Structures are given as structure tokens and as C-alpha cells.
Amino acid sequence: MVSESLPLQGLSAIVTGAGRGLGRAEALELARLGASVVVNDFGQPGRDGSGGADATPAEEVAAEIRAAGGRAVAHLGDVADHEQARSLAQLAVDTYGKLDILVNNAGILRDRMIFSMSEDEWDTVIRVHLKGHFNTTHFASVHWRARSKAAGAPVYGRIVNTSSEAFLAGSAGQPNYAAAKGGIVGLTTSTALALGKYGVTSNVICPRARTRMTEDVFAAVYPIKKGAEPGAGELDPLAPEHVAPLVGYLASPAAGTVNGQLLVVHGGMVAVVERPKVSAKFDTAKDAFSYEELDALLTPHYADRPPNETFAAAEVLGLKHA
């Protein structure tokens, strides 16, 4: 029977990008709920992935977990490197006997408008976010499939991936980031379908949090209120600690029927996002559409919309921060 106070007791977890920000908060929360954690971080100081690898951030978080009475080991590795991702999954198995939970959070930013972005800026962000999610998911899924086949029954497996509202609503200066985050949603839903029969769930969150990667983005839009600075007794509405409990829930036995879902989370709010729906449908009066017929049907449909309107999901879903 799972303890209500420690629902993850006896389970092991990997959290990538866990040396700082969201990943750190998520690793601490999983440990608080009873999980044994592998804290992964490449430790580069620049949010753009610049600087040398540094084991210190991961080691400090692992030490913090152990100091609180939990179990944790650090892993210095680039999840976008296939072999380093393999070693990460193997470390969890070697240390704890199995892997139960994978939280993918590692990422970088290299923002630029589409007309100014270089090939390297595009490739690097896609590599870290999308390929990084794929690499760890691949090795975790190999582990779970083999265990399920050996047992002749489903096993326990949870994947929590990290997308962004940049995918939902667009972000003009982040075409690489938005594309990677959209790809992660597709990876998540595909994985959910593929691994469900083995007992594994795969879900994705769009968190809004003030971290090293986003502090300047949110500084002007969501400034920290006077008197709400860290230590003043009021939690920042965009603190990563608002996101971590949802990750803990999705990693838990309680979320066993939650699979292939996209959830937006920040500041004491969780929104469940439905799959896209058809808003209008047109049929040709003939065997095939002509330009003229499409013009007669579609132009009036879009006539009352602003020319630069996009899928402004943050507003449509009522997710604008108070």
C-alpha cells in the first residue's frame, strides 16, 4: 500500500536539468514524496548552453536531498548526447535497481527573430530540447519494455515532459524554442500510445516560472511585487515551487489513468488543454476545390480577424496572469 504522505516511496526517478530552477524544484519535490532521485545537469553557466560543464549544480541538489533524509546521486551529462543519456538511465538502474520516473526538463535558449536566426542557433536548441527528450525517453522505454516482457505484465513507469506556452501561443523571437516545444508535445503523445500497454504513462506540462532562463522575460511583464522578494514570506506567483507539485502528482500512482495529456501550470493554477478542435469545415460543391471556390468560402471566414492574429492560447484559455 502506498503511503499517502510518501506516494513515491520505493520508486526511483531521473530529473534532467535539475541543478537549477524548475528541475531543482521538481527533484526536491519528488524526493520529498519519497522517490530516490538521479539529479542530472550539465552545469553550463550560460542559459544559452555556453561555458564548460560543471558537476557542482547537480551535486549540490543531490546533497540537499540527502541532507533532508532522502536518497540522491548526481549525474553530470548532456542529455542531447545519445551515449550520455544511456549512461544516465543506466546510473538509475545500477544505483536503485530500476527506473520508475523520468522528468525531462533540461533546456537552453538562443533567442532570435526568424530572419536573424543562424543555422547553429536553430540546431542547438532543437538538439538540447527535442533530441534531449527523445534520448532519455528512448532508454527509459527500452528499460520498461524489457521489464514488462520479463514480468509478463505491465510495470510502473511515468514520463513527465516539459513543453511551453511558446508552443501554444507562439513567441516571435523564439522560432527554434517554440518548434522544439511543439515537437516535445508530439513526442509525448506518440510515446503515450506506444508505452501504455507496458504500464507507462507519458504527459507534458507547459510551466510558467521565473528561472535563470526566463528571469529577464518575466521581469517586465510579471515583476516581483514589493515585499514579495524571497524570504519575505510571500511566494512569487512564478516560483518554480508552484510547478513541482504537479510533476509529483503526474509521477505518482494516483495519476495512473492520466496519459497523453497536456497541462499548463503556474502560480496556483493548472489548466488541462484539450486536443485541437475543428472550428469550421467547408466542402466543395464539385469534385475538387478551385481557387475561386476557396476564395469565396475562406476569405469571408477570416474577414473579421486582425491580420496578425495567431492562436493566442494564453488569452483564449484565460491563462493571462493576474
Image (cartoon, rainbow, N blue to C red):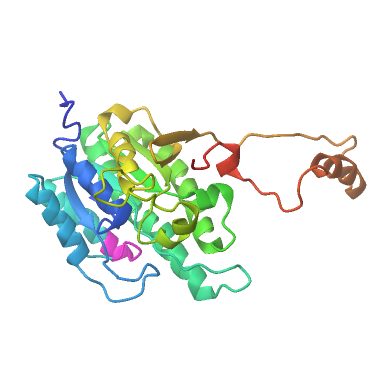
| Residue 213: quadrant of the picture | bottom left
Q: Is residue 15 visible?
A: no
262 left or right, relative to 159: right
Camera sees residue 177: yes
Residue at image location 38% in from the left, 36% down from the top = 268
Compare residues 78 and 49 and report the one nearer the observer: 49
Left or right of 274: which side holds 250?
A: left
How far across and down, in percent of the image, does residue 70 sit? 10, 45
Residue 147 placement: quadrant: top left
Q: Is residue 260 left or right of residue 293?
A: left
Look at the image and give the residue range highlighted in magenta: 78-85
Furthest toward the front, the residue is 226
Q: Is residue 88 magenta?
A: no
Give how far across and how far down residue 151 sits, in percent. Answer: 21, 34
**Would residue 80 be counted in the magenta stretch?**
yes
Quadrant showing the N terminus: top left
Residue shown at 10%/47% (left/top)? 71
Q: Position of residue 287 (x, y in %)?
A: 87, 38
Against 184, residue 176 (above or below) is below
Q: Residue furthest right?
A: 292
